[in-house]
Image (cartoon, rainbow, N blue to C red):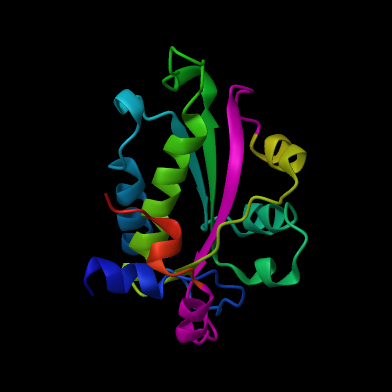
Amino acid sequence: MNFLEIAKNRFSCRSYSDKPVENEKIIQIMEAARIAPSAHNFQPWYFVVVSQNKELLKKTHETYHRDWFNDAPVVIIAYANKEKAWTRKTDQKNHSDIDISIAIDHITLAATNLGLATCWICNFYVDKVQELFNLPKNLEPIALIPVGYCNNKPDLDRFEQKRKPLDEIAKFL
C-alpha cells in the first residue's frame, strides 16, 4: 500500500480475533515509534508492550471499561515524559503530548501496514495503569493502544463519507 492507502485503511478496531500477533510485527511497530520525530529530537516517550505475560495482560485489560478491550492480544501503553520534552520559550508550551501523539500515530499506521488493527484509547483508568506498572511519576500515561487482528473490518467507505472536504479544513494561498 502507498501512504494514503495505509492512512485510509487505518480505523479504530473494537473486535479482535484470538490470533496471536507475531513478535516480529510488534518489534516493527515499536521501531516505527522509535523513529518518530519529536521537538528538538528529545524523544520524551516511553512504551510498555504487554503481550507475553497473560496475567499482566488480563490486569491491563482491567484499566479500560469496555468488554471488547479484553480480547486485545497486545496492549501498548504510551507514556509522555514532560520533564524531558521541549518547551517553547515564548509561552512555555510543553510539547510532550504532541510528540507522543506523533509516535502513537506511527504505531497505528505501522500496524495497519502489517495487516493489524489498533485503537487509540485515552479514556482509561490512569490510576490503575500507574499502580499496575509502577513507573516513575514523571511518566504520564497518555494512551492505551490495543493491537491485534481484526474480527470484522468495517466499511471504510462509510468513514470517508464522514470526513470533511479538503476545502473546509485547509486554505491554499
Query: Which residue is depicted at the point 45% across and 62% down?
Result: 168
In the image, 58 versus 116, the foreground residue is: 116
What number of labels is visible? 0
Residue 106 x, y percent position in the rendering: 36, 52
In the image, 150 versus 98, the foreground residue is: 98
Given the current orientation, which residue lies at the most extreme top position? 89
In the image, 121 versus 157, the foreground residue is: 157
Note whether 108 is above or below 38 in the view shown.
below
* Quadrant, the N terminus: bottom left
Residue 3's quadrant in the figure?
bottom left
Query: Which residue is depicted at the point 38% across and 73% down?
Result: 8
Per the rendered image, the range of residues in magenta is: 134-162
38 within the magenta span: no
Note whether 74 is above or below 161 in the view shown.
above
Query: Which residue is depicted at the point 43% across and 28% down?
Result: 44
Residue 167 x, y percent position in the rendering: 39, 64
Residue 137 x, y percent position in the rendering: 64, 23
139 within the magenta span: yes
Note whether 8 is above or below 108 in the view shown.
below
Residue 134 x, y percent position in the rendering: 66, 31
Query: Which residue is depicted at the point 31% across and 42% down?
Result: 36
